[in-house]
Amino acid sequence: MTEKQIELPTAKVDFSDAQRLADLWGIIQYFRTIMQACSRLERLVDENSEDNILIESLWTAALIRYARCFATGKRFGLPRDVFQGQKGEPIKCHQFYMDLRDKHIAHSVNSFEQTEVGLVLSPVSSSEKKVVGVVRLSMRHFVPDKTGIHQLGSLSKVAHDKTCSLAKEIENKVLEEGRKIPIQELYRIARSQLVAPGPDSVNKPRT
């Protein structure tokens, strides 16, 4: 064990608020990944990058994670009213990205991704009119312009900050509820875990 690490017993809890807090922490991490992906995409657009595989991969990952933050089911998902009070039409913009995720990723047949078959004909001026070949006609819209990328990043930043505030409130509830559990029971189920000190520990003298 190094001087920078302290071995602390940690008791895992799964009561309602603890589960909700775990979901919120996961959502916060998703939003941070989305913001990083959007920032990288904006740089790629500025650089006129032709790496379409990288661009599409980053955009797809951002859309998938964004939708997961608002999904409901086994985990706690954010309501879209998290954007209420913001300037412009954030909820309408939010719904656009949710729909885009569905059309662009969830369903293989959609207006954003089309492939058709065409027959190539001889030139109109040709003396013999005939079919000379077969060609693929395809259209694919896989990433918006820089404005669209920036909007997704901005929505994620707003939702991230509100989620952090909510997570802090729930964290306090978890701490309060956790302190009601018999301490010996907590030590019984605890497991050792190496915990790195936080930023507040930088100015503290060594013990």
Image: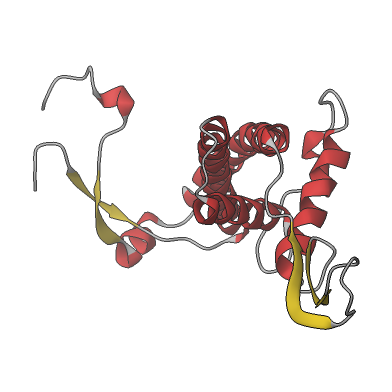
Where is residue 167? Give x, y as percent: 59, 41
Q: Residue furthest top?
A: 203
Instruction: Identify the residue at horizontal 14%, vertical 19% (top origin).
Output: 205
Q: How is the image coloured?
A: secondary structure
Instruction: Identify the residue at horizontal 84%, vertical 32% (top origin).
Output: 84
User: Height in image: 38 above or below 114?
Assistant: above
Where is residue 80? Give x, y as percent: 81, 45
Instruction: Identify the residue at horizontal 63%, vertical 33% (top origin).
Output: 157
Query: Looking at the image, which is closer to me, 120 or 137?
Result: 120
Instruction: Identify the residue at horizontal 52%, vertical 56% (top origin).
Output: 53
Query: Looking at the image, which is closer to me, 149 or 23?
Result: 149
User: Height in image: 74 above or below 156?
Assistant: below
Q: Is residue 51 left or right of residue 157?
A: left
Where is residue 98? Give x, y as percent: 78, 53
Q: Is residue 104 left or right of residue 29?
A: right
Q: Residue furthest front?
A: 127
Q: Quadrant of the C terminus?
A: top left
The number of callouts visible is 0
- In the rendered image, is residue 126 in sight? yes
Q: Is residue 183 left or right of residue 104?
A: left
User: Height in image: 198 above or below 11?
Assistant: above
Q: Is residue 207 left or right of residue 41?
A: left
Where is residue 192? Give x, y as percent: 24, 58
- In the rendered image, is residue 17 in sight? no
